[in-house]
Image (cartoon, rainbow, N blue to C red):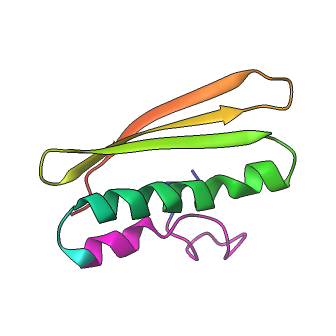
Amino acid sequence: MSIGTDKGRWWADKEFGSEIWKLRLTGKITPTTVGTFRQMVLDSVQWLIDDGLASGIECEAEQQGRNTIAYRVTVKRPDNNTIEIEESWNGI
């Protein structure tokens, strides 16, 4: 939910969500866009670490085709278990 919700749009917390929507304004996906996307994903889930729900988070992202970024988020929990989320973003 943190990644897919536009930051500032959730009624309960204006700081919740991501700024990935801003990438649509660039008009195309480039290697720079992919790096920015990755950082925006990490920023949107930082609260999991801040609240003690995760001890670490990693994100891998790569361009697939003209308009898609595939990404994987790995969340390491405090008990050393991990959760992986794989998705793609078709934003441009």
Q: Residue at x 53, y 65 (%)?
A: 18
Q: Residue at x 86, y 52 (%)?
A: 51
Q: How many marks?
A: 0
Q: Nearer the viewer, residue 88 or 57?
A: 57
List x then y, in percent, for residue 91.
27, 60
Q: For residue 29, which quarter of the picture?
A: bottom left
Membership of 19 in magenta stretch: yes
Residue 26 vs 30, above or below: the answer is below
Q: Is residue 13 left or right of residue 23?
A: right
Q: For residue 50, which quarter of the picture?
A: bottom right
List x then y, in percent, for residue 2.
59, 55
Q: Is residue 91 left or right of residue 87?
A: left
Membership of 21 in magenta stretch: yes
Residue 3 vs 26, above or below: the answer is above
Q: Hey, which residue is sitting farthest left in the picture?
A: 66
Q: Residue at x 70, y 56 (%)?
A: 46
Q: For residue 8, which quarter of the picture?
A: bottom right
The C terminus appears in which quarter of the rendering?
A: bottom left
Q: Is residue 8 left or right of residue 13?
A: left
Q: Is residue 67 left or right of residue 73?
A: left
Q: What segment is highlighted magenta in the picture?
A: 6-25
Give the dominant element type of the magenta stretch: helix, strand or loop. Answer: loop
Residue 50 vs 16, above or below: the answer is above
Q: Hey, which residue is sitting farthest front in the picture?
A: 31
Q: Residue at x 49, y 68 (%)?
A: 6
Q: Nearer the viewer, residue 87 or 8?
A: 87
